[in-house]
Amino acid sequence: MTARRRSPQDVGDELWDLIGNFGGEGMPREIALDKMTESQFEIAKAWDRDNRCIAEHECLVYLYSLYMRTKDPRLALLAVVRELALMRKRAVRLHRSAIAPLDPADRQSPQIIVASQAVDGILRSTKRMSDAGFSVDLALRGEGPPE
């Protein structure tokens, strides 16, 4: 069966309402996938994050395998920290798999240098959080994770 085409706003509005129906409990992904395809779900999340969050002054977060709408800064912070940890992990993997294996001469091309600097920028900007074990409280105090 082929799913009917739907606009990003249409699926975004539907997802926003579905998540809202769960209140602070959070909605499992499978609930949305009963109503839309995986592709529509991804488009809906992007549309909501790009449009609805700002318009509604509400955060859309993914925590503990659940999607939630919230105004709670603690939940928003947990979501941000989770995403930063994922970005750092992806940047490390990109460096190891797409830059480091190149011959030294190839790594000197202007294009590779710019790409490498971008990856290094992500690593530098997330270092403080990484050093603190992605604990915001420890990062604020300039400490590492407890031993």
Image: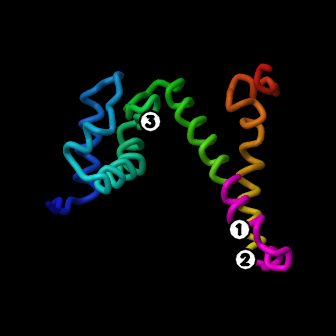
Front one among 93 and 131: 93
Mark 2 and mark 3: Cα distance apart in space: 35 Å
The label shown at residue 111 is 2
The kind of secondary structure the magenta stretch mainly shows is helix
Q: Amino acid at mark 2?
A: Gln
Callout 1–callout 2 Cβ contact below 8 Å:
yes
Q: Which residues are magenta?
A: 92-111
Residue on which disc 3 sits:
61
Front one among 65 and 25: 65
Q: Where is residue 145? Give x, y as percent.
A: 76, 25
The quarter of the displayed image where residue 6 is located: bottom left
Mark 1 and mark 2: Cα distance apart in space: 6 Å
Q: Where is residue 93? Give x, y as percent.
A: 67, 54
Q: Where is residue 67? Give x, y as percent.
A: 38, 34
Quarter of the picture containing the C terminus is top right
Q: Where is residue 77? Give x, y as percent.
A: 56, 30
